[in-house]
Image (spheres, rainbow, N blue to C red):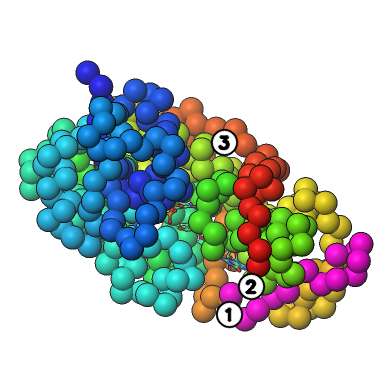
């Protein structure tokens, strides 16, 4: 019998990669999307067929703020596995919509777990919770692993800590097979356009094509451990295939500043950058024509910042046999090629 997966957040970056991964593993995949005023299924249009069509991939409306929709979906689908990837996932935006971020990311997770429990499906459904390295926040030490204490520094990070602990709580209290993935930043050509990697590559490609003049950024000196989303959805699935539920850090073990990322992407696109100035006045100059193409703006800084992230995924390597396959340069290469082929928009 085919396994069935229910994915909350199917229209997002990870939802799209996970759907395609599970379809290849011959799952029936049911995705949950929220209502929006314009069609937002671009990332999954290639696998989406009309609901009446005999297909292993179907999408239903639902919302993590609406307990009844969650309960009805789980009751009707009775999936073997649930992946909760839905979230207000932008850290900077969470400072502007803190209550909504907590509602969706924190209470939304509780609503799914409570639906599983109240339908008496504790022993039938395996649950994956999309946790994040943002939960570590202000950390000390060279690496973060499963034993590193959480000290979140954004409403997003705090909301994800609630989701992490409530997932653990339902596992311990009710015996639900529930896993927390603590994933470090992962990117791809279909990354949301306001996350820094996509923003950098999209802007630099447009500048190269003459369709944009400058790229405006915030903090150039925070460090991130960037992997590829394709590798990371495999880790989610592997967590649910184990004999026992557990929590795992997933990262590459390498870290780079935002400025490093800009330099690597610029080189790939064919710019040679020289940096001048300091602080908010730091600028990236295209050495070929002496034009400033990167500047900093206050509005892209956050009230508090996670300065340093570097994941130690030894536990996942040992227990899941999970290894990241793509390096930061593989990732940049794929993102640049995609942007060069697909983006001809004028500024
Ligand atoms: P994403 O691209 O922002 O996707 C988020 C998904 O959640 C979208 O499908 C979005 O729908 C949906 N969503 C938002 N609010 C919802 C609501 N109220 N009800 C139902 N669905 C809702 O995020 P991602 O990068 O794929 O990340 C997937 C998950 O992993 C998120 O929970 C994120 O916080 C977490 N995470 C991500 C990373 C990373 O580096 N990518 C790292 C660690 C953890 P719309 O398409 O309608 O907006
Ligand atoms: O790309 P970002 O917005 O990602 P951030 O804040 O690290 O969060 C992402 O990764 C988390 C895992 O650690 C996820 F849980 C979360 O859902 C999301 O996917 O920013 C990365 C860094 C930050 O330090 C930010 O201050 O880039 C810096 N940055 C500098 N200029 C900028 C900009 N970030 C954005 N988005 N836009 C800028 O202009």
Q: Is mark 3 within 8 Å of ligand 1?
A: no
Q: Earlier in the sequence, mark 2 or mark 3?
A: 2
Asked if the residues shown at circle 3 and circle 1 are in contact, with their CB atoms under 8 angstroms apart, the answer is no
Q: Residue at x 29, y 29 (%)?
A: 56
Q: Earlier in the sequence, mark 3 or mark 1?
A: 1
Which residue is label 1 attached to? 299
Q: Is residue 258 visible?
A: no
Q: Is residue 203 visible?
A: yes
Q: CA distance from mark 3 to mark 1?
A: 34 Å
Magenta region: 286-300
Q: CA distance from mark 2 to mark 3?
A: 28 Å
Helix, strand or loop at label 1? It is helix
Q: Is mark 2 within 8 Å of ligand 2?
A: yes
Label 1 crowd bin: few (<14), some (14–19), many (20+), radius 10 Å: few
- Closer to viewer: mark 3 or mark 1: 1
Residue 296 belongs to the span the image colors magenta = yes
Mark sitting on residue 324: 3
Which residue is label 2 attached to? 218
In-front residue for pair 43/282: 43
Label 3 crowd bin: few (<14), some (14–19), many (20+), radius 10 Å: some
Q: Position of residue 185 (x, y in %)?
A: 53, 52
In-front residue for pair 276/22: 22
The N terminus sits in image quarter = top left
């Amino acid at each position: 019998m085919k396994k069935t997966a229910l994915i909350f957040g199917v229209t997002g970056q990870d939802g799209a990669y996970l759907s395609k991964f599970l379809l290849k593993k011959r799952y029936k995949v049911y995705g949950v999307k929220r209502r929006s005023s314009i069609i937002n299924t671009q990332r999954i249009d290639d696998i989406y067929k009309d609901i009446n069509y005999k297909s292993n991939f179907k999408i239903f409306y639902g919302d993590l703020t609406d307990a009844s929709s969650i309960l009805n979906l789980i009751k009707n689908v009775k999936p073997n596995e649930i992946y909760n990837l839905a979230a207000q996932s932008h850290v900077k935006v969470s400072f502007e919509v803190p209550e909504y971020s907590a509602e969706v990311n924190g209470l939304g997770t509780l609503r799914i777990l409570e639906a599983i429990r109240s339908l008496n499906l504790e022993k039938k459904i395996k649950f994956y919770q999309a946790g994040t390295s943002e939960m570590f926040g202000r950390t000390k030490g060279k690496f973060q692993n499963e034993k590193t204490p959480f000290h979140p520094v954004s409403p997003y990070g705090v909301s994800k800590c609630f989701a992490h602990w409530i997932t653990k709580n339902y596992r311990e209290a009710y015996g639900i097979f529930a896993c927390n993935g603590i994933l470090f930043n992962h990117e791809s050509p279909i990354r949301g356009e306001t996350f820094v990697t996509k923003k950098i590559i999209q802007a630099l490609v447009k500048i190269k094509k003459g369709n944009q003049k400058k790229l405006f950024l915030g903090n150039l000196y925070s460090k991130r451990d960037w992997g590829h989303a394709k590798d990371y959805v495999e880790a989610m699935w592997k967590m649910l295939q184990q004999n026992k539920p557990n929590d795992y850090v997933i990262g590459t073990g390498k870290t780079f500043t935002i400025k490093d990322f800009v330099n690597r992407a610029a080189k790939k696109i064919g710019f040679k950058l020289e940096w001048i100035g300091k602080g908010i006045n730091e600028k990236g100059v295209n050495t070929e024509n002496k034009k400033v193409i990167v500047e900093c703006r206050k509005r892209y800084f956050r009230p508090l910042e996670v300065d340093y992230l570097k994941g130690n995924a030894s536990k996942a390597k040992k227990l899941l046999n999970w290894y990241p396959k793509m390096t930061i340069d593989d990732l940049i290469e794929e993102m640049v090629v995609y942007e060069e082929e697909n983006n001809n928009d004028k500024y």
